[in-house]
Image (cartoon, grey):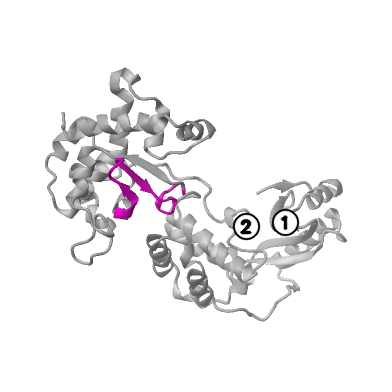
C-alpha cells in the first residue's frame, strides 16, 4: 500500500494521478487513509470500535478537496480521543442493504462458469463450500468489512501468492466488485493487508523421480488405460490435464504430431508435441473422442486416477517433467540440447528470448530430436 505525506502538495499530486481504480493510501497519521479514484480523494478513518468488541470500522471524515490534510489529522485525532474517553461520537450508520453474500457468490460463479475449465469450476465451488461459513453467506454484501474477510481467511492463510486462501480472497473481491461495493473490503491494497501476514510461504517443489530410475519404473507399466496415459505423460513431458483431455482429432499420426489447443494449455498458447514410436504405442487403438477415456464413465480420467499413489516413494506424476528436464540438461555435459529447446518442450514461455526461439521454424525439429532421445532412454527402445 502506498504512503502519502500529510502535506497539501503531496495530497494534490496523489489525487491528480489517481485513475479509475479505487486505491487506499496510508498517511503519517495512524489509522487515517486517503482514498483516491479518478482524480478525487476523501479521508477515511480506519479504527477498532471498543463499543463493538474491537470490530474494525471505517468512518468518513470528508472530501480531500475541501478538508485540508491538517484539518483531517485534527478531525481524526479528536474522533479517536472522544472514542477512547467514552464520549459520544457520531458515526454515520446506514441500514444494511444489498443482497446476501451467499446469493451474490452463487450468481457470480454461474455467470463466469464458461470462462473456467471444469476442474476450476469445481475447485472454486469447493473453496466456498469448505471455507465460507454460513454467517458470512448470510451477510448483506454492503456490511462486509475487512475484519470479516480476515476472519474467514486467517485459518487457511499462508501469505499472498498462488494458494487457496489468496484465490478465495480474489474471488470474494470479484464478487463484491460485481455488486459495486466500494471501497472493496477484500482488496489486498486496502486495510486487509494490515490484518493478515504479508510473508509469502516458501515454495515447495513437487518430488520428482531421479531420471536414472525412470526406465526401471517405466518398464513396470502395463496396457491399462491408466498405465498407457502414464506412459504417454512421461514420454511427452506434458502436464497431466493436457494429456488426460487429449482427443483423437488433435493427433496427426501421419506427420507424427500432437497439436494441443490453447484452451487446455497452462500458458494459453497452442502447443505442438513431436510424437515418437513409444508415444504412439502408448496411445492405443485410434478412436473417435477421448484418447484415455475412463472405463467406468467413458469421460475423462479423473486426476486422482494417476495421483501420487500411482508412483512409488512419494514421487508425483507432475515430477516426471522435472525428471525429463534434469536428464536433458546433462546430456553430453550440457551440450546436446539447448536450454531454449528444453523450455519449449515443457511449454515454458518465459520472456522474449525463449518465446522468439519457440517460434523459430527449426526449433520443432530440434524438439523432435530431444523427444526421440528421451523416449529411447525412458522406454529403452535402443
* Residue 221 in view: yes
* Residue 31 in view: no
Residue 33's mark? 1
Q: Nearer the viewer, residue 229 or 125?
A: 229
Q: Write down the region rendered in magenta.
A: 246-268
Is 155 situated left or right of 40 in this image? left
Is there CB contact under 8 Å for labels 2 and 1? yes
Mark 1 residue crowding within 10 angstroms, few (<14) / some (14–19) / many (20+): many
Classify mark 1: helix, strand or loop.
strand
Q: How many marks?
A: 2
Q: Is residue 238 magenta?
A: no
x and y percent of residue 222 in the render? 12, 47
Vertical position of residue 155 compared to residue 213: above or below: below
| Corner quadrant of residue 24 | bottom right
Q: Which residue is mark 2?
A: 191
Vertical position of residue 23 compared to residue 141: above or below: above
Q: CA distance from mark 2 to mark 1?
A: 9 Å
| Residue for point 54% across, 74% down | 104
Q: Quadrant of the C terminus?
A: top left
Q: Nearer the viewer, residue 284 or 205?
A: 284
Residue 339's mark? none
| Corner quadrant of residue 371 | top left
Vertical position of residue 322 compared to residue 145: above or below: above
Mark 2 residue crowding within 10 angstroms, few (<14) / some (14–19) / many (20+): many
| Residue for point 84% across, 50% down | 12
Amino acid at each position: 500500500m502506498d504512503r502519502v505525506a500529510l502535506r497539501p502538495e503531496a495530497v494534490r499530486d496523489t489525487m491528480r494521478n489517481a485513475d479509475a481504480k479505487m486505491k487506499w493510501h496510508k498517511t503519517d497519521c495512524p489509522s487515517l487513509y486517503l482514498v483516491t479514484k479518478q482524480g478525487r480523494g476523501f479521508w477515511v478513518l480506519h479504527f477498532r470500535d471498543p463499543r463493538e468488541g474491537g470490530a474494525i470500522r471505517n468512518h468518513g471524515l470528508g472530501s480531500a478537496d475541501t478538508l485540508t490534510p491538517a484539518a483531517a489529522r485534527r478531525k481524526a485525532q479528536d474522533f479517536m480521543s472522544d472514542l477512547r474517553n467514552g464520549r459520544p461520537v457520531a458515526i454515520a450508520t446506514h441500514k444494511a442493504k444489498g443482497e446476501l453474500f451467499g446469493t451474490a457468490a452463487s450468481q457470480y460463479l454461474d455467470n463466469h462458469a464458461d470462462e473456467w475449465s471444469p476442474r476450476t469450476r469445481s475447485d472454486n465451488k469447493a473453496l466456498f463450500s469448505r471455507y465460507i461459513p454460513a454467517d458470512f453467506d448470510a451477510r448483506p454484501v454492503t456490511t462486509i468489512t475487512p475484519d470479516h474477510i480476515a476472519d474467514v481467511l486467517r485459518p487457511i492463510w499462508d501469505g499472498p501468492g498462488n494458494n487457496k486462501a489468496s484465490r478465495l480472497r480474489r474471488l470474494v473481491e470479484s464478487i463484491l466488485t460485481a455488486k459495486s461495493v466500494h471501497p472493496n473490503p477484500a482488496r489486498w491494497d486496502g486495510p486487509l493487508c494490515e490484518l493478515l501476514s504479508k510473508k509469502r510461504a516458501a515454495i515447495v517443489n513437487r518430488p520428482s523421480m531421479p531420471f536414472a530410475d525412470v526406465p526401471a519404473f517405466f518398464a513396470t507399466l502395463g496396457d491399462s488405460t491408466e498405465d498407457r496415459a502414464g506412459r504417454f505423460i512421461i514420454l511427452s513431458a506434458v502436464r497431466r490435464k493436457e494429456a488426460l483431455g487429449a482427443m483423437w482429432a488433435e493427433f496427426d499420426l501421419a506427420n507424427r504430431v500432437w497439436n494441443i489447443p490453447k484452451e487446455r494449455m497452462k500458458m494459453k498458447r497452442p502447443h505442438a508435441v513431436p510424437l515418437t514410436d513409444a508415444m504412439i504405442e502408448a496411445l492405443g487403438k485410434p478412436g473417435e473422442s477421448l484418447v484415455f477415456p475412463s472405463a467406468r464413465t467413458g469421460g475423462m480420467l479423473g486426476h486422482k486416477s494417476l495421483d501420487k499413489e500411482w508412483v512409488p516413494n512419494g514421487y508425483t506424476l507432475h515430477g516426471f517433467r522435472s525428471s525429463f528436464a534434469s536428464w536433458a540438461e546433462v546430456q553430453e555435459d550440457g551440450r546436446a540440447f539447448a536450454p531454449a529447446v528444453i523450455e519449449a518442450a515443457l511449454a515454458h514461455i518465459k520472456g522474449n528470448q525463449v518465446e522468439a526461439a519457440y517460434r523459430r521454424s527449426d526449433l520443432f525439429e530440434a524438439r523432435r530430436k530431444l523427444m526421440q532421445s528421451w523416449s529411447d532412454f525412458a522406454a529403452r527402445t535402443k
